Amino acid sequence: MSRTTYQCTCGAVLEYKQDLVSDRGTTGRTWKCRQCATPVPGIVAEKIGHQHPS
């Protein structure tokens, strides 16, 4: 299985769950970049959310 990465607009490479911030709202969960709080697409964030640096 390949790793999923995402290049944020701030330049950060999001690769692991620790790189994301989860925000639970009334319509569900949204994911944001930990460095700049830019929203990350849900499908990409869900894949990254299951990756650990171990």
Image (spheres, rainbow, N blue to C red):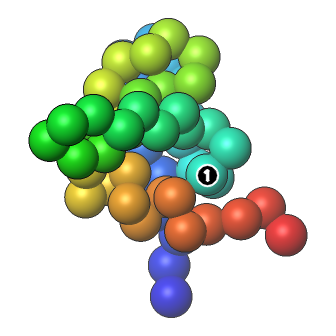
Q: Specify the farthest residue to the right.
A: 54
Residue positioned most to the bottom: 1
Query: Which residue is label 1 attached to?
Result: 17
Tag 1: residue type? Lys
How packed mark 1 is, by other alpha carbons closer than 10 Å (few <14, some 14-19, many 20 or more), is some
Query: Relative to 40, does residue 38 appear above or below in the rendering?
Result: above
Residue 35 lies, in percent from the top left, at: 59, 16
Q: Residue at x 38, y 51 (%)?
A: 45
Q: Residue at x 62, y 38 (%)?
A: 19
| SS of the residue under disc 1 | helix
Q: Is residue 33 above or below residue 10?
A: below
Q: Residue 22 placed where, x, y %?
A: 47, 38
4 left or right, relative to 43: right
Residue nearest the viewer, comparing 29 with 31? 29
Picture residue at 50% right of the left edge, 11% below the top: 36
Q: Is residue 14 above or below residue 35?
A: below
Quadrant of the drawing holding the C terminus: bottom right
Residue found farthest to the left? 27
Q: Position of residue 37 (x, y in %)?
A: 44, 16
Q: Total label count?
A: 1
Q: Is residue 39 left or right of residue 6?
A: left
x%, y% of residue 49? 51, 58
User: Is 48 rendered above or below residue 27?
Assistant: below
Res 47 seen here? yes
